[in-house]
Image (tube, helix red, strand yellow):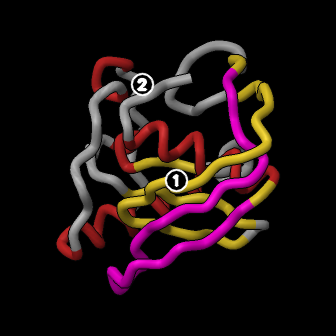
Amino acid sequence: MIKNLIHDPMFLGMKSRPATAADSAIARDLLDTLLAHRETCVGMAANMIGKTVRIIAFSDGGVPTVMYNPEIVSCSGEFTAREGCLSLIGEPRETKRCRNITVKFQDSKFAWKTKSFSGFTAQIIQHEVDHCNGVLI
């Protein structure tokens, strides 16, 4: 189900709790909401739809992808990026990102995976993991 976006920086600044299998409906709603905004958005975290749980959804080269409990375990190639966010009003802001990351996460069956990403997909994941950690650009 498509959900309304949260714009309250106090709420968005809260750290998210770990996701469990009971949160799969939140992941579906997050993915539905991301797809509804696909013209202007490439990634979302659950707190953007009002749920403080560690779930992100993003476009991985055009493929909608969900991660539960993502954690960036390595990062290299730091650069300065300008990013916008559907939950934040105003112009894009500067932030530090890495060109290459490795992420530990759980898939839809809650099996642990580790996968490396680079380029724009790595940047999207970093932005959404920041949301899970209560960090805003």
N-terminal of the pair, mark 1 or mark 2, is: 2
Q: How many marks?
A: 2
Please state the extent of the stretch shown in magenta in the rendering. 95-117
Q: Is residue 35 visible?
A: no
Whole-number angstrom distance, CA of label 1 to CA of label 2:
25 Å
State the residue lying farthest toward the left: 22
Q: Give the x, y percent position of residue 18.
A: 24, 56
* Disc 2 residue type (three-letter): His
Residue at x-position 78% and y-position 47%: 99
Q: Give the x, y percent position of residue 118.
A: 77, 58
Q: Say which residue label 2 marks.
A: 7
- State whether residue 125 is above or below residue 65: above
Q: Name the residue nearer the viewer: 113 or 66.
A: 113
- The image quadrant that residue 102 belongs to is bottom right
Q: Give the x, y percent position of residue 64.
A: 62, 69
Q: Name the residue nearer the viewer: 6 or 45.
A: 45
